[in-house]
Every structure is written in C-alpha cells, then in structure tokens.
Image: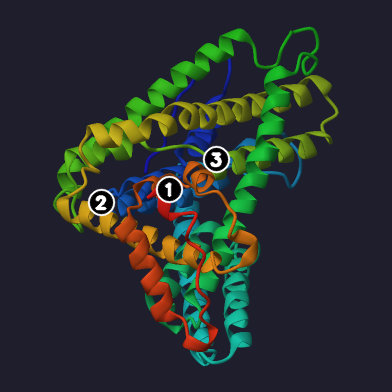
Amino acid sequence: PSIRCICFPLILTIILSLLSSGLHEATDPVAVAVLLNELGAPPRLKMHISGESLMNDGSAVVFYTIFSSRFFYEFGLDGIGEEIGWGKGFALFFRLAFGGAAIGLAFGIGTVFILFHLDRRLSGEDSVIQVVTTISAAYLSFFTSEILAHCSGIIAVLFCGVTVKAFGETLLNNLQLTHHFWEITEHLLNALLFALGGSVWGEIIGDQTYTEGQGRLFARQDWGYLALLYVLLMVIRMFLIYSFYPITKRIGIGTNWKESLFAAYGGLRGAVGIALALSLHAETIHFTSSIPNESAQMSFRTSTAKVFGFTGGIAFLTLFINATTCGPLLIKLGLVTPTETRKKVLENYRQHMIQFTLVEYVKLMTEDRFQTVDFMVMKEHIPFFNEITYDKFMIAVQKYKDITPSKGYLEPSIEHVIPYL
C-alpha cells in the first residue's frame, strides 16, 4: 500500500491531499467476495483481494491518524492536533503499526486461552460465551490499542482476529453460530454506515447554503475533479499492482496477470473510507466551533466537506461502475470457466434437489387439504416440475413409502397428478 497524493488546484492543501489519499486507500472486498463465491472464482483470488483489503484498511487508518493530527494542528487551538515532521511521522507510523500488532497478538493469544477452557461441545451455554468472548476481544483490543496505548486499533483487531483464526478456530464449539453472528453484525453495521454516509454525502453535494454567497458547496467543476480522481485512482492502482507483479507471482500462493488485472479493477471503496471521512468532518465541525474567526472556521469545514464529498463520490462510482462490471470481466478473463467436474457436481445436486422436493410433495398428497391441488398450477410455480416424468414420480412415491414407518404410512392421493406426466 502506498500514499496516493493527488492535489487539485485551489481545492485541497497538501496536508488534506495526503489525508484524502489515505481515505481512498481503503478498499472494501465484501461485494466482490460475494460475486467471486457466486461465480466460483479461484480461492486464491479471493485470498488476494481480502488480504490486500485488510492491509489497505490498516495502513489507511494509520495514515489517517498521522495526517489528521497534522491537519488539526493548523486550527491553532491548544491541545488540538500535533505538529508532525518527517522524522516524527515515520516514528509515529512504526509505533501505530507495530504497537497495534503486538497488542492484537497479545489479545489473540488470551482469547485462544479462554476458548480452550470453554471447549465443551455438549454445553450450549459455552458456545454462546465463546461468541461473546470474540466480541469482547475485538472491542477490548481496539480500545486498549487506540485509547490507552495510542496505537492503531484496527491493526490490533486485525492481528487479534488472525491469531484466533490460526490457533483457536478448532476450539469453537459451534463454528456456524460464530460465523453467522459476525455475518449478521457486519451486514447491519455496513448498512447503517452506508445509510448514514449516503445521507451526509447527499446533504453535502446538494447544499446551496453551506458557503456564503458562493453557490453550491460541491460545484460543477468538482464533479469534473471527481471523475478525474476516479480515473487517476484506477490508473495508480493498476500501476502499483503490476509493479509488484514479478514478486507476487513468485511468492506465497502465486498469481497470474489475469488475477492481478481483476484485483486492480475490483478495488472497490466503501466502509472504512466513508467512516474515516465522516469522523474527519464531524471532528472538524466540533473543534472549529472554538475558532473565533468565522471565515477560518468556514474554510476548514468547507475543506473537510469537500474531502468527504470526494470520498463518498469515489465509493459511489466504484460501486456503480466497477461492482456492476466485475462479473462480466471475471467471465471474459476466463477465471470462472466451469470444469467438467464442477458441471457434474452441480447437475447431481440439482437432480438430488428435484428428487427430495418430489418426495416432500408426495408426502403432502397424503393430507386431505392438498388432494385437490391442481398439478398444472404447481408446474407454473415450480419450474423444474415440468421435467418430471412418470418414472421419476413413481420413484419418489416408492421412496416415500420406504422411509415412512408402516404404522404411520398413508396412501398418497396421486390420481390427479398421473394424467399430467
């Protein structure tokens, strides 16, 4: 990951440009990961995209912490921000990154120790406590690193999670319960964040009264800058990924030029960048309320509002353009070409599903309330019923008879079905 410094004339200062570059660095793999799962993309492609996103998010928060502190220092208020030079900046970067990693590793080891002592698979309550342990570890590691130790909280959570995944996953009594809980939590918080971010972004780009007598806050030329920023970010991302391609194809699980092209194109912006931009804008409004000079106050607020406008705009464009075209690109590159084995597995699954559904249908035919149901209506609502032959249906009838205890067996009423087969 690297800083992408893009300075547009008369819009952003150098510090705000560096700060904005950190916000654009964070990528969101959620939408792409869902697409890769649906189309059956290579597992290593999912690993590359998810792993890169984790590192991007961690470094984005570190750069945000450094540059936002320097930006707040420009307010000229006591106790707000910090003057950071090159030397201090590098020292702060290593403290945030490595300090957060060490704290996360410590919490991860502690969590594995607790999970080990809760590894009693016959106790449902212990399974719930294990889930609560993962929640507590995530939030405590973030709080300890970010608030108490003044290191990177998100990197602490990252290393805590990696440690638990590596050494504690087999200790979880109910792995599905843990996965489902975090999937629901992620979905709800992502939805809340995008709803909040979208509302603020809409207010900013449509606000005509934010600045005194200067028209819209997000003017027509800013839309042009937004389009230019989108193109430059795509070009820079492509350049960075292919610059390291000779190394990435030889180390670890490897890669190829097609996967690298998709990884470059599939770098969607989302939750982390929007959250940081929201935080920057909210803190700026809070801190500048103490500045007596209304012109300076409005200048700072306008600048961070524009940063949020660009961040939200890039997230919107990548979701609207990249996300919707990732599927066709994946197929065009030949990364999801189904093998003969995959086709056979899917067809076998489909036939099993049809047979299971038929047996359940025959079971319903033993109840009086379903004996007059029109089979033609069933075929209209269940498409694969059109493929049912007489032989398949009679196999289902026999299977239902075989799996039902003789005392509980009732003869299904199939007279109204046979004529349609």
Q: Position of residue 193 (x, y in %)?
A: 65, 44
The Cα atoms of the two marked residues, 3 and 1, are separated by: 20 Å
Q: Going by the image, does 158 lie left or right of 200?
A: left
The quarter of the displayed image where residue 263 is located: top left
The image shows residue 83, relative to residue 220, as above or below, that is below
The residue labelled by disc 2 is: 42
Residue 139 against residue 230 in the figure, above or below: below
Q: Which mark is residue 273?
A: 3
Task: Read off the residue under disc 1.
Answer: 34
Residue 145: image location, x then y, percent:
58, 65
Q: CA distance from mark 3 to mark 2?
A: 27 Å
Q: Position of residue 111 (x, y in %)?
A: 52, 80
Going from N to C along the chain, the mark reached first, 3 or 2, is: 2
Rendered view: 405 above or below 84: below
Instruction: Name the N-terminal-most of marks 2 and 1.
Output: 1
Kindly identify the amino acid type of the residue bearing the numbered disc 1.
Val
Q: How far separated are the C-alphas under marks 2 and 1?
A: 13 Å
